[in-house]
Image: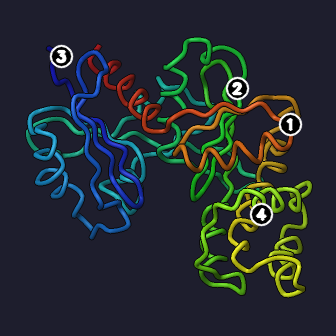
Amino acid sequence: MATPAFLACDWGTTNLRAWLMADDGRVLKSRDFPFGVSQLAPGEAAKRFREEVRPGLVAEHLPAVLCGMIGSTLGWAVADYLPCPASLADLRGDLMEVEGGQARVTIVPGLRCEGLTGAPDVMRGEETQVFGWTRLAPERRRGRWVVCHPGTHAKWVLVEEGRIVRFVTAMTGELFAVLRKHSVLKSDAASDDEPAFDEGVAAAGDGGALASRLFSARSRVVAGDARADTTPSYLSGLLIGAEAAAAPDLLGIAPDAPVALIGEPALCRWYSRALKGRGRLVSIHNGDEAARAGLFALQQEMAA
């Protein structure tokens, strides 16, 4: 029978995913909690972790490793942003220990690199998933890889010899939400119309002049060329299509370079559709599995 070894948590903005992990990396128990850091009052994280998360997985006396926004200014304590290039060993060397009661609690630092404007670009949580993804297959720790992590703030990541060298953030998910709720494009219709999505991807062109291209989401409807209920799907395709067209160039990625998508399967499916429509080879990988692998690798290094 596998022995419980530690508690792994990916504590994001909207929710917390927690896994009771065995000493061989297997998941013994898992739970989602509906209190991401955006719902926490100052100083509340430690209390809820102690009173709800630990008992919820019967892990009161086990060490815990946490990644994600819990290490931000909204979370438990502010963990560093380490400069790129960075490796898993670099993360291990800068883990932040916080007061967690009866057993050790550590928070994974984020990463930073120089952004497009000269201001820094940052990530927090995605680095653990990317490093976990490299641990799931040894060949991913050699050579050059392109990883995309779709989400509210999508990350495009360049991985070389097992290190994160550079990345670019695209606020595609947040822009979609804002436009859909607070603009002339607002709509409560579903965004699962594949032909409308594909039309939006095609309309994105090379990803440039996005502000002008966005108006087509309205003009196609008011001119009578499309139904209003197709707008969210078209808008999604336009935004994801623009990102898929522009982001690889920003990282100097060749047109024939394959892209590994890591994240929530449903969202990865739409990114895959847009990227394949542009002729790229794509693979899809589960974000929770990658996060667990990254947290397990860090715990192993701490226990060594």
Residue under label 2: 145
- Neighbor class of circle 4 (other Cα within 10 Å; few <14, some 14-19, many 20+) is many
- In this rendering, is residue 244 above or below 196? above
Q: Earlier in the sequence, mark 2 or mark 1?
A: 2
- The amino acid type, in three-letter code, at marker 1 is Gly
Residue under label 3: 2
- The amino acid type, in three-letter code, at marker 3 is Ala
- The amino acid type, in three-letter code, at marker 4 is Ala
- In this rendering, is residue 141 above or below 248? above
Assess whether mark 3 and mark 1 are in contact (beta carbons under 8 angstroms): no
Tell me where residue 85 sits by quadrant: top right
Distance from disc 4 to disc 2, alpha carbons, whole Å, reads 31 Å
Residue drawn where x is 29% and y is 36% of the image: 8
- Residue 2 percent coordinates (x, y): 18, 16
- In this rendering, is residue 245 above or below 282? below
In front: mark 1 or mark 3?
A: 1
In front: mark 4 or mark 2?
A: 4
Frontmost residue, 103 versus 246: 246
Residue drawn where x is 34% and y is 58% of the image: 75
Assess whether mark 2 and mark 4 are in contact (beta carbons under 8 angstroms): no
Frontmost residue, 195 versus 166: 195
- In this rendering, is residue 218 above or below 148? below
Assess whether mark 3 and mark 2 are in contact (beta carbons under 8 angstroms): no
Q: Earlier in the sequence, mark 1 or mark 3?
A: 3
- Residue 191 percent coordinates (x, y): 64, 65
Disc number at residue 196? 4
